[in-house]
Amino acid sequence: MELIWLVLALLVVNLAAIRFAVDTRPGFEHSRRPWVRPARAGARRSVGG
Amino acid sequence: MNFGVPLGLSSGLCWGAADFFGGMQSRRLPALTVAFWSQVAGALGLAAALAVSGTRPTPAGVAWGLVAGAGSGCALVLFYRGLAEGTMSIVAPVSACGAAVPVAAALLTGHRPGALAGLGVVTAIAGVVLVSRPRRDPGGPARTGRSRRILLMALGSALGFGLFYVFVDAGTTGSRGEPLWVIAGARASSLVMLSTIALVGNRSALRWPGRRIGAVALVGIGDTGANLLFAYAATTGNLAVVGVLGSLYPVATVVLARWLLGERLSGGQNAGVALALTGVGLLAAA
């Protein structure tokens, strides 16, 4: 029974990684470089996330 | 002379520095790229260590390692992504609270954790709650949502690292597997998991990091070096003391972030970081 909980927890981590890791933008919190938000490309430039 | 203390301290410093520079590289490259190529470099270092040690694998130990790696590879991506996007001084201590997962696993299997472990869990949770309290920020709701997302990534990585501890313990203590081979199994499956995520999501995430490969490789070698230092420290010194020293790795990340990035936290967040680190230390000592 406890193994089921551990496997479920493992699945949660895997799904979270798939959800967040496929985003290939590097983190820009501390960068001064401007970047284009892919979904709004062409609409406006966004700086710093 | 007992080398346990300096080796344990070195492993903590090495882990913390590798995490900091992994996070720094993830600000310039996708977190998945950094996690994958640093793990490849670490695997090469591990292969060298295995060749030197001449130890033989046990099937059960390697099997538990393979299960452990399914969580740790994903946890590493979430961790690097959190470090890249958020405040490292918060993400690193929150992620280290994964030390509470083995306590939860012990409860699931019907074991009663000791008073020190219970106190560690309560202290770590109090720390996480304090650092996650929303600040009055001019960024407004958008920034609050971003902070929540980063906190979720840090908690996800904590869960993944915590599961890694549980499964590695099952491989080394439960199945009496050789620790190096358990870690090798974990490294192999984490690379498979990272490749699978890239195939499912975005294949370009595994592209060659180009001129940054040296820095990325150093992150992986630093991480593997810390593992080996810890393993050697545990065999030569008092495991309780070495465990606590090794668990202090987020301190190195926090110090580097303050020193090199000039990160500053509010009074409440500082208290939360201190509580989280104390909780991790208590859990390691339990």
Image (tube, rainbow, N blue to C red):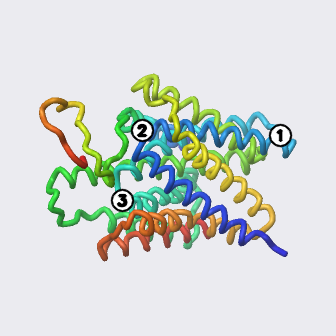
Q: Earlier in the sequence, mark 1 or mark 3?
A: 1
- The reply to whether dot 1 and dot 3 touch (C-beta < 8 Å) is no
Say which residue appears at 75% left-offset and 41% top-offset.
Answer: B181
Disc 2 marks a residue whose amino acid type is Pro
- The residue to which callout 1 is attached is B51
- Tell me the subunit letter for badge 1: B
Inspect the image, locate mark 3, and give the three-letter code of the amino acid beneath it. Thr
Horizontal relation, residue B140 to residue B26: left or right: left
Q: Residue at x 51, y 68 (%)?
A: B251
CB of mark 1 within 8 Å of CB of mark 2? no
- Mark 3 residue crowding within 10 angstroms, few (<14) / some (14–19) / many (20+): many
User: Where residue B57 appears, x then y in whole percent?
Assistant: 80, 37
Q: Residue furthest left?
A: A43
Q: Which of the 4 quarters of the picture holds residue B38?
A: top right
Question: Residue B87 got which mark?
Answer: 3
Mark 2 residue element: loop
Among numbered discs 1 and 2, the one appearing first in the sequence: 2
Foreground pick, B236 / A27: A27
Dot 1 alpha-carbon crowd within 10 angstroms: few under 14, some 14 to 19, many 20 or more: few
Q: Inspect the image, locate mark 1, and give the three-letter code of the amino acid beneath it.
A: Ala
* Residue bearing mark 2: B30
